[in-house]
Image (cartoon, rainbow, N blue to C red):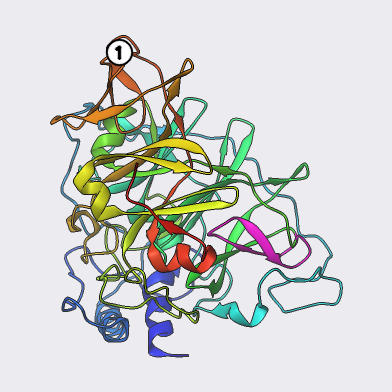
Amino acid sequence: MSIVSLALLAVACGSDSDSSAESEPPAVETEPTPVESGASLRTQAGALVDQAEEDSESETPVSGETPTEPAVVEPATCGFGDDLSPAEVVIDQIQGEERDTNPSALIGGHPDFPDPLVDPDQIISGGPPPDGIPPIDAPRFQTAASVDWLRCSEPVLSLVVDGDARAYPLQIMTWHEIVNDTFAELPVTVSFCPLCNSALVYVREVGGRTLDFGTSGRLFNSSLVMYDRTTESLWTHFNGQAVVGTLTGVQLERLPVQTTSWADFLEAHPDGIVLTRNTGFQRSYGRNPYEGYDNTADNPFLFRGELDPRLAAKERVVSITDGGASIAIVLDHLVEQRVLDVDVAGRRLSVWHLPGASSALDTGVIADGRDVGTVGVFDPVVDGEVLVFTPDDDGRFTDDLTGSTWNIGGEAIDGELTGTRLTGVPHLDTFWFAIAAFRPDTEIVQGL
């Protein structure tokens, strides 16, 4: 196994609650080994391995029910709410069906499988074994008002289903990548791939069957490959499709999700709930094991395809796909404009940007990452009228028809349309190499 694979395995897998190893993740006060800006991932990996070895010399056993303290312990209520009690919220989870008797794609090809949709030789090991980066199958939540362990700029995944708003902090998702969760009667899988900087949410129902998803330990185009535990088919995180195994060709339904700052989530959803660090695993939540990974001067980890030279491989883009059309907006361009109107497959969309959210892949402490902000993509039609939006100086957006004020979540918070919510359109905040590999026909657009 290469030093890079060893490093990613060491820092991302750690030790779980069932491990017999008498060790604990790095102490809170220990800072990650510095990595110079622009350093290669191989150099970074060596530094991370050295740090892991150094930390292990002073580790002591702890209970598996006690989550590792975060790298950042500074309280940050952001001025919202004052209930700092441990207000746990219990969610009834729908479990996936038990393992079938069909052959497993985790083992390899099988004559009973449909023809694979991708070259299986291009699905390669990233280092960890299946579920070596452990998904969260029993997520625990607390009320947003009771959270005192997130700083205002920290990035969270904001998912709203029928008014039920939940935040999944990237300080947790970075270490687990998948959460199998349930909204009322709707089972979902929340996934985050650090290597391609993408977050996607899928409905984990297929033909009336409920699936649970795990991390296969493999990569395709430097992107997370998931597997379902019922058939052990392999699925690409990037487009939610089974590509090898019994369910090859099945496509999961995708739900819109935003990567936003904790402060913005809390302001928009003060009654929302938050995934807690009480995961049953021991990780250095708050630390970034991929320090410096979003450096645009570096190439992606274990990427075997041809890089599209139109942009730097790790240029941050906003990807929107609709049927046969795929577009990418360079994030830096959107940051300058704040609002862009784009056309995707003949459909007009409004794309917004709000500063204030940190990159989860920049510095050793996630909350200290540079500001990459929040993106929202919306259908601008309300009651048959196409609204045109203008950003203001207070982090809000105003429509030209009624002068109502809207937040980055697409909800009108003041004016004639107060309470109206725009229809969110699924999009990806991702790296250019990833969308270019999965959709080489992607058009780079500057807006209308």
Question: Going by the image, does 196 lie left or right of 370?
Answer: right
Q: At 49% across and 46% down in the image, what residue appears?
A: 139
Residue 358 place in picture, x, y as percent: 23, 52
**Camera sees residue 372:** yes
286, above or below 42, in the image: above
Question: At 22% across and 43% down in the image, what residue appears?
Answer: 337
Residue 89 coordinates in the image, percent (x, y): 45, 33
Residue at 55% across, 72% down: 220
Name the element at disc 1. Answer: loop
Q: Indicate the position of residue 200 as horizontal and vertical percent values.
A: 49, 51
Residue 58, above or below 243: below
Does 232 lie within the magenta span? yes
Question: Where is residue 71 shown, x and y percent of the image?
Answer: 22, 59
**Left or right of residue 447, residue 440 in this image:** right
Of 221 and 45, nearer the camera is 221
- In the rendered image, the quadrant that contains the C terminus is top left
Name the residue beneath numbered marker 1: 402
Direction right: furthest residue: 112
The span shown in magenta is 231-247
Assess disc 1: are there few (<14), some (14-19) or many (≥20) residues with their C-alpha within 10 Å of its C-alpha. Answer: few
Q: Identify the residue at horizontal 38%, vertical 89% (top origin).
A: 3
Residue type at numbered disc 1: Thr
